[in-house]
Image (cartoon, rainbow, N blue to C red):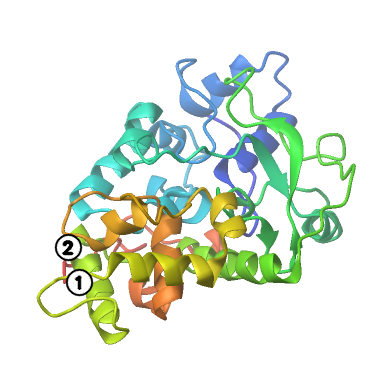
Amino acid sequence: MVNFFPTPYPDELLYSTLARYCMRSGNIREIHNFEDLFGTRNCIAAMELPTQLDALIKNMPVSTKYTAEYFIYNHTLFPFLAAFIPEERAKKIIQTMRNGEGAVSYIRIGLISNSITLNKYFRFCPECFKEDIETFGEPYWHRSHQITGVFVCSKHKIPLYNSTELIRAGNRQRYISASHKNCIVEEEISYSNDLMEKMLWMAEDAEILLNNQFGFKEPEWFKNQFRVKLIEKGYARMNNYIHQRKLKQDFQAFYGEEYLNLVQSPISLKNTCWLSQMVQNNSRTTYALRYLLLSRFLGISNEKWTKSPLNPSPLTLFSKSTLFSFFAPKI
């Protein structure tokens, strides 16, 4: 059992909070931090979907108000990555994050099969870095900065930069904090006004998913919402026929080929692509960012997918039975 636990900062990754614990623990060997936190050495320092959270809660100081669900929804990328998956699958991922193996969650959430290459390095915003030091006395890893496909900070409207810290390489049993040493701007990044506009759209839309509660629904429900808009805008007929070529041409013109390539969602005008699959009658779930791309193109407000804001502060936590109602009934 640990004698103390750092209070998570706003928009902080659980990975980052655990890294701050490790800095203060006084343990000489890094593996001893895992024994303190999880009661085992058989664990890895995952960023997006951490595991063994039940063990972490069990080893917390006496009378802690934290729960595994609180960390999952407020300090991991689960709310974004799982926003468009069925309820049953979401429950299994949560259970895996509580006491299972991490690789299973990445498979269930579709990150393995969607041909999306996840970020290689932790990312940071230089202005957030400065503000965090001024406000909290130290920098930390923001979860909104780590979403694959988000390239700018929605708060400061400037590019995000890669740190020198690898996410999935080297020692996976080591938590590393953001610092002056690994968050260095060697060369300023500049995007065109057009690209910045698209990037800000995505950063803002992604944060809506990240910071709101939602009711999990089957893929068919989302396809029905898109189908209504496709018919309204002349891309589909009531008999389910879809004008695929016109849809893809207009979609590519709306975002631009350069931006779609950057977010790993290029459009093929001749062959079937992810966009074609999303609007057809199939049960495949694709990367959440692509749902946001289609939503923005069709003029669907992303608040439509959410229910209510998540609890932002651990200081207002109550018991496990009264904290949240995480799963809304299917609609």
Q: Residue at x 72, y 36 (%)?
A: 177
What separation in Å lies between label 1 and label 2 (alpha carbons)? 6 Å
User: Picture coordinates of residue 253 (x, y %)?
Assistant: 52, 70
Residue extending furthest right? 186
Answer above or below: position of 179 versus 267. above
Tell me the residue that label 1 is attached to. Answer: 224
Q: Position of residue 172 (x, y in %)?
A: 57, 21
Q: Which quadrant holds residue 173?
A: top right
**Residue sitting nearer the eye, 4 or 235:** 235
- Between 84 and 56, the one lying in front of the other is 84
Q: Is residue 247 visible?
A: yes
Q: Secondary structure at mark 1?
A: helix
Q: Report crowding for label 2: few under 14, some 14 to 19, many 20 or more residues within 10 A (C-alpha).
A: some
Disc 1 residue type (three-letter): Asn
Q: Which mark is residue 73?
A: none
Q: Residues within 10 Å of mark 1 (few under 14, many from 20)?
A: few
Which three-letter amino acid code belongs to the residue tagged 2? Glu
* Residue 277 % position (x, y): 27, 54
Query: Of helix, strand and loop, which one carries label 2?
Result: helix
- Asked if residue 291 lies left or right of residue 152, the reply is left
**Residue 322, quarter of the rendered image:** bottom left
User: x%, y% of residue 244?
Assistant: 29, 65
Q: Is residue 289 left or right of residue 120?
A: left
- Asked if residue 66 can be seen in this view, the reply is no
Label placed on residue 220:
2
